[in-house]
Amino acid sequence: MWRNSPTQFGLASRLLHWTMAALILALLVLGTALGWIKPNLSTLWLYGLHKTMGLTALSLAVIRLIWHRISPPPPPLGPTAHWQNRAARATHLALYLLMLAIPLSGWIASSATGLDVVIFGQITLPAITPTSEALENAGFAMHGILTKLLLALLLAHIAGAVLRGLKGDGTLRRITKGL
């Protein structure tokens, strides 16, 4: 079943979740590597790859939000404490905000360099800020800070999922197998 039910995640939600998880992990690794290398003509394609993956992640986040309006996710399972459900809800909200803000901050910073933002090696995106060294520096600083926050929240999200999985309440099984 593609749609979510009151008790299960549908195939569409599971595919979006795991595709985005893999994409975000790849972006974190690639983005970290880009922070260590000096930009030059031989590494320029890596920046294009990172931008393409980032804008793909942004698009999938928007699709995922729309999908959750069309097919709402099921409520949490088990007799979890109220504070844990609130923490999980707040973490999910923050993750979604970061999945939108991080690629946008990268696009802002890249636009501010004055260089074209090209994705898929062919599509030139419009600049969303004027060329400005101050905006470039602020945008890349924000991009880095938000990414570190995302990493911390992802670790909390994964830890919570693993803990619930160890409890055997079915939460982890629901997002992996839809059961």
Image (spheres, helix red, strand yellow):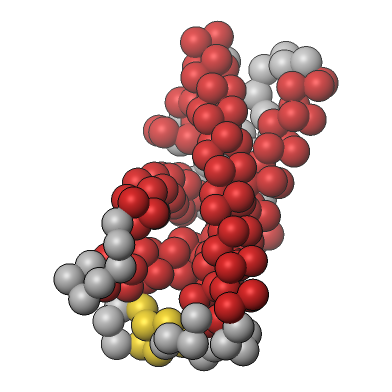
Residue 127 x %, y %: 54, 88
**Which residue: 55% across, 53% down?**
144
Direction right: furthest residue: 82
Residue 79 x %, y %: 72, 14
Left or right side of 133 for 38: left
For the residue pair 135 and 79, the one nearer the viewer reads as 135
Residue 58 x %, y %: 52, 65
Res 64 → quadrant: bottom right
Looking at the image, how many numbered discs can be counted on the residues? 0
**Which residue: 52% across, 67% down?**
106
- Tell me if residue 59 comes above or below residue 152 in the rendering: below
Left or right side of 38 for 72: right
Direction left: furthest residue: 42
Residue 15 visible in image: no
**Which residue: 70% across, 46% down?**
93
For the residue pair 119 and 114, the one nearer the viewer reads as 114
- Tell me if residue 107 comes above or below residue 88 in the rendering: below
**Which residue: 66% across, 42% down?**
92
- Tell me if residue 19 comes above or below residue 91 in the rendering: below
- Tell me if residue 148 comes above or below residue 141 in the rendering: above
Residue 86 visible in image: yes
Residue 62 x %, y %: 58, 65
